[in-house]
Amino acid sequence: MAALFFVNGFTYTNVVPWLPAIKDGLGLSNAALGTAIAAMPFGALLTGMLAGPLIGRFGSGRVAVASGVLGAGVLPLVAAAPGWGTLAAALFALGCADAWMDPAMNAHALRVQLRYGRSIINLFHALWSIAAVSGGLVGASMAQLGVPLPVHLGVVAVLLVAAVLAASPFLLPGPEHAERGIGGGSTQGPRELLRRARPAVGALLALSLLLMLAGAIEDAAASWGAVYTHGELGAPLMLASLPFIACQSMMTVGRLTGDRLTDRFGAVAVARGGMLLAAAGMAGALLWPQTAPTIAGFGLVGLGVATLFPLTLAAAGEIPGVRSGDGVVIVGWLGRLGSLTLPPLVGMVADASSLGTALWLVPVGSLCAVLLAATLRPRA
């Protein structure tokens, strides 16, 4: 199970450091590159709801393995793309694979957690964070050393496929949702999936909004940390990346310790405490606009938001009367849909005033998450 989370976090992050080289090699404009990259979330949104029927028909373990192989297999196509269309198509396929693997591996992780007898979902997401950072570092190192892109991504693809296939025999056997005692698999499509989940629509929408906030707060450091630190605080470029590094590092720490805290204090208390910490960290950084407090503030944001994403997915997989895979798929899909609107909102507010003003949306969103955290309370 851990191997699947590592593979998912490691796959696309190997591509990210190569994006400037891909842009130059294909002669793309900034807008063209951005549009090609946008094919990834578009593919995820367009096909993400298929994950529920796939999990119901084949089981979360098999879907996670198959989509992991698909995602790794697409990497060489990214390297070999001769033009914009092929690049966009490869990234579209990568988005589809991620949209199927993400709910499948989380649904299977919930099965493992139920058998384990205590919270371990945060540990899996900690491994994902470590893999994401590792993938970026490997990609940057290969680019710096001058290793050809097709060689790099080809070798990575082979290793990832081998890792996924090696993990396959260790996944849980038996029917899906056996640990919860809910009805077995189904081949019904997305419309039927939504119809069956209708009685729990309030909980699903609340958890989806909570997942949107988690994604937006996590994204703040990646999207705006360097821009704010360099553009508005005048920090050198060498220091401008530190808000993101601090956020990711502290997020990993939070996820490594999150399961123990969840077992002791409960998901609601952990989420509320974390989001209050995130709000305080971002507010402190904005009220004290200097480089060091800003880096520390983004670090606190990462520590505070660390458990919100895994705890929300875990709650989505435990809604009474809704099968684990269906709950995770619906909440994850709606969460992706909302996350596309929040980063542009920050940009529009920043253009109308300043980025420092726009980033106040982070503590506001954190406080909204505090109110919504009651949705994480286990249901009878």
Image (spheres, rainbow, N blue to C red):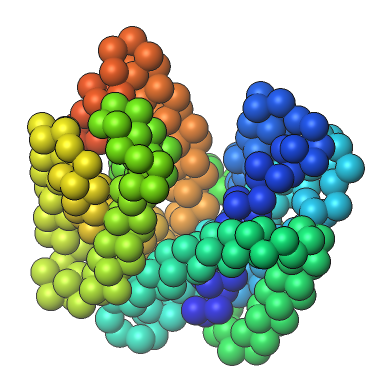
Q: Is 275 placed left or right of 337 in the picture?
A: left
Counting from the top left corner in percent of width and height, residue 19 is at: 66, 45
Asked whether the viewer can see residue 80, the reply is yes
The residue drawn where x is 66% and y is 81% is 163
Residue 224 image offset from top left, x and y in percent: 37, 35
Q: Residue furthest right?
A: 82
Residue 223 placement (x, y as % from top left): 42, 38
Looking at the picture, tell me which residue is in the foreground, 252 or 366.
252
Q: Residue at x 12, y 55 (%)?
A: 273
Task: Provide residue 379's location: percent of width, then percent of height.
Answer: 25, 60
Residue 319: image quadrant is: bottom left
Using the rendered view, name the quadrant where residue 42 is placed: top right
Q: Which sits in the foreground, 370 or 280?
A: 280
Q: Residue at x 21, y 29 (%)?
A: 360
Q: Quadrant of residue 118?
A: bottom left
Q: Is 122 drawn above or below residue 34 in the view shown?
A: below
Q: How many marks?
A: 0
Relative to 272, residue 60 above or below:
below
Asked if residue 54 can be seen in this view, the reply is no
> Residue 380 vs residue 134: left or right?
left
Q: Which quadrant does the C terminus fall into?
A: bottom left
Q: Residue at the location (23% across, 58% down)?
A: 303
Is residue 317 positioned above or below 17 on the image? below
Q: Decide: is 111 above or below 128.
A: below
